Amino acid sequence: MTQKINRRKYLLLILNILFYCLLDFKSLPLLLLLILFTFFCTNVKKYKKFFAILGVSVTALVWLFYKSYIMRLPLGLSFYSFKIISYILDCYKGKISFQNHFISYFIYVTYFPEIISGPISRGNTIVNQLEQSFTFQKEKWLKGMQLILSGLFLKYVIANRAMLYVDKVFGDFSSYTGLTLFIAAILYSIQIYGDFSGYSNLSIGVSNLLGFEIERNFNRPYFSKSIKEFWGRWHISLSSWLKDYIYIPLGGNRKGKLRKWFNSMVTFLVSGFWHGNGTGYLFWGCYHGVLSNFSTPKTKSKIKTLGLQLLTFIEITIGWIFFRTESFTKGILYLKQMVTTFRIEYSTVLSSILPFTGDNSSIALAIILFLLVLFEWIVEVKRKDDYSSQNYGLILFVYVFSIIVLGVFGVNKFIYMNY
């Protein structure tokens, strides 16, 4: 059944406005002003380069001002700012030819499934699909429903349950021994993946229901064999944005090894600042900037591959410690406490598992959590586009059952809403 495109356009227009009004009505004027101003910049017939630079500069300065001086960020500012900047630059380069369609541009910037925590879609992804007729596709709907349930599962069962341990330990890490801090660091790696990839799945799943095809934002990042490979699998939309609009314009890897290292450092510093202006975020950016310059080792050995994956996961987890503490000093103290007090004894092991629930039932919950993570990994690795098989129904059942029985609710905010 085919619907007229204008119906979908105006429906999305209304949904986007209502969504933003309900969540952050006070910040709506800023969003509207930026949209109007930058739309004007992309449609001026003369002095295109000047107005492209002006539009990018104003958007970047607004983002920098709020990131540096205002404690409370407008909802989705970091995400829609980058979407606006990429749109202006793509228009200037002639990659997008819909500049005079204000409604399409408005929908692209305010697209409600993405405005909270991404992904950061490009203009030619949303705008081009808006100009196409919407046709109901059963497979796309089934795929969308699985992604939505997968997102809820990752958020409420995996991320929120890991959060119970993480928040307690990171909130007063000096009171715990090394084993507890080690477990908390591992669980935070799981939490942030479940939280952010969960939202991405929700966003992409809802987009599928609306007739849009959005590129996946995560591709099993913790199975990377190097930090460089990790950034091709983690938050893919941001990684590709930074590469296309910062790293390559700076010269990329075309101007020698020293310049390549410099360009990487600048790019990852921007990434760190994009997440926050605390010293922990900036160090996290520098840390990944350095490690990303080492190429991914080539090997056919499964044992060596597993060793590289484990080493990379440890490197990533160390970086997350600084990200979670938001402070370079606290991150160093956390690592110091973890290393100097690390020991494996019965009393230490017992005290390390208690923060999860406050009693020994945390062992059972930890086992269940492990099995659920394993289930999600199997689903991810065995990903197929056959949504009519019996496995599809079983997967949905496990998701729904787990969410109802083991979901941790009452903490609905996604981590990346802070950025």
Image (cartoon, grey):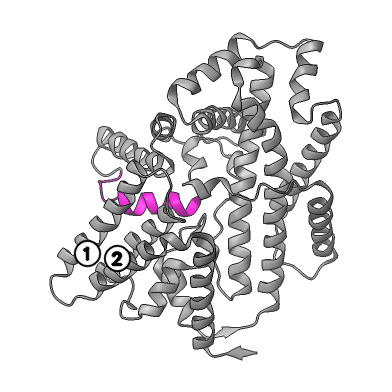
Q: Horizontally, is 207 left or right of 287 in the view?
A: right
- Residue drawn at 37 percent across, 45 percent down: 70
Q: Could you say which is closer to the camera, residue 283 or residue 37?
A: 37
Q: Residue drawn 44% across and 51% down?
A: 238
Is there any visible trace of residue 234 in the rendered image? no
Q: Is residue 333 left or right of residue 67?
A: right
Q: Which residues are magenta?
A: 234-252
Using the rendered image of the protein, determine whether residue 405 is visible from the camera's viewpoint: yes
Snapshot quadrant of residue 179: top right
Residue type at mark 2? Ile
Image coordinates for residue 325, horizontal then vertical, percent: 51, 29
Amino acid type at circle 1 is Ala
Residue 88 — which label? 2
Specify whether residue 409 is painted magenta: no
Magenta stretch, main secondary structure, is helix
Secondary structure state at the residue bearing disc 2: helix
Q: Residue furthest front?
A: 26
Residue 52's disc number: 1
Image quarter (top left, top right, bottom left or bottom right) of the N terminus? bottom right
Q: Residue furthest left?
A: 47
Q: Classify 10 Å Cα crowding around label 1: few (below 14), some (14-19), many (20 and above).
A: many
Q: State if disc 2 and disc 1 touch (CB < 8 Å).
A: yes
Q: Position of residue 164 (x, y in %)?
A: 70, 35
